[in-house]
Amino acid sequence: MNKVEICGVNTSKLPLLTNKEMYELFQQMHKGDSTAREKLVKGNLRLVLSVIQRFHNRGELVDDLFQVGCIGLIKAIDNFDLSQNVKFSTYAVPMIIGEIRRYLRDNNPVRVSRSLRDIAYKVLQARDALANKLNREPSIKEISEELGLKREEIVFALDSIQEPVSLFEPIYHDGGDPIYVMDQINDVKNDDNKWLEILAVKDAFQKLNERERLILNLRFYHGKTQMEVADEIGISQAQVSRLEKSALGHLRKFVQ
């Protein structure tokens, strides 16, 4: 994010417009002056730069984010209403952020159905509207009643548009080694008890005779059916079944 040049634009030399200049340019643009529109775009590129700083840890190229942010800026310029008593930056920043978020969602490696995304967008709009109306963050129940949707649908839709987080994403840094997401995840499949069980089974497996080991190996490590095992070692399926039960019984006894 320390690049001076982005998409061929020297960011250290970007112009900065005053409120008076902005007002005059908007008036000229609304009269059909395309040059004024171009000046408005160039004069607000610093706004795009400030917004894309928020997305620097998403793994996207800065140039790509800048281009998408410029699209949001142009949309904001084309739709800005001078009669409203609102600063342009106040109006433009959400537009730029929205454009970048749409880009990130559409390029998300986790594919989400269009219908589910549409529900999520409606939920976000309803949440913002209720927040303005209630002067607080609305609950899932309130959003559910507003849209006439089940609470589970709302939660599932919102979860579907969340950005995936890397296991190597740093979450804390105190000047020493950083703590990553993976450091805070409990591995329920590979705790000490599981390792002890694996070692016990491995030890017990060696105590079986050669035919029992062969049958269990083909059945549970190679995923073959009893009929396939019977064909491979030249005995009947009934014999395989009987030997398998016997081998499992011995295995349990050795593990205990």
Image: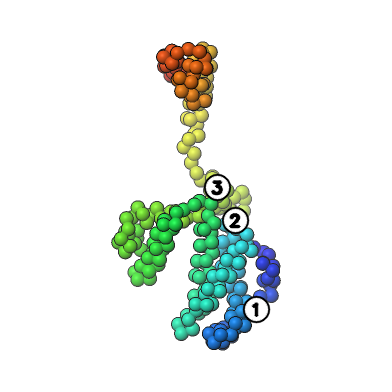
Q: Earlier along the polypeptide chain: callout 3 or callout 2?
A: 2
User: Residue 118 in the image: x percent, y percent?
Assistant: 42, 60
User: Which residue position holds label 3?
Assistant: 167
Q: Determine which quarter of the picture holds residue 120.
A: bottom left
Mark 3 neighbour class, 10 Å CA radius: few under 14, some 14 to 19, many 20 or more: few
Tell me whether the residue at label 3 lies in contact with that at label 2, contact meaning CB atoms closer than 8 angstroms: no
Residue at 37% x, 65% y is 126
Residue that label 1 marks = 15
**If you read the primary sequence from the N terminus, does the residue marked by circle 1 or circle 2 appear first?**
1
Residue 3, quarter of the rendered image: bottom right
The picture places residue 198, in percent across and down from the top left corner, at 50, 26
Mark 1 or 3 closer to N-term? 1
Density class for disc 1 (Cα within 10 Å; few <14, some 14-19, many ≥20) is: some
Q: What residue is pinned by disc 2?
A: 59
Identify which residue, 62 or 228, lies in the foreground.
Answer: 228
Left or right: residue 141 versus residue 170 is left
- CA gap between label 3 and label 2 equals 13 Å
Q: Are marks 1 and 3 in contact (CB under 8 Å)?
A: no
Label 3 SS: loop
The mark lying in front, picked from 1 and 3, is: 1
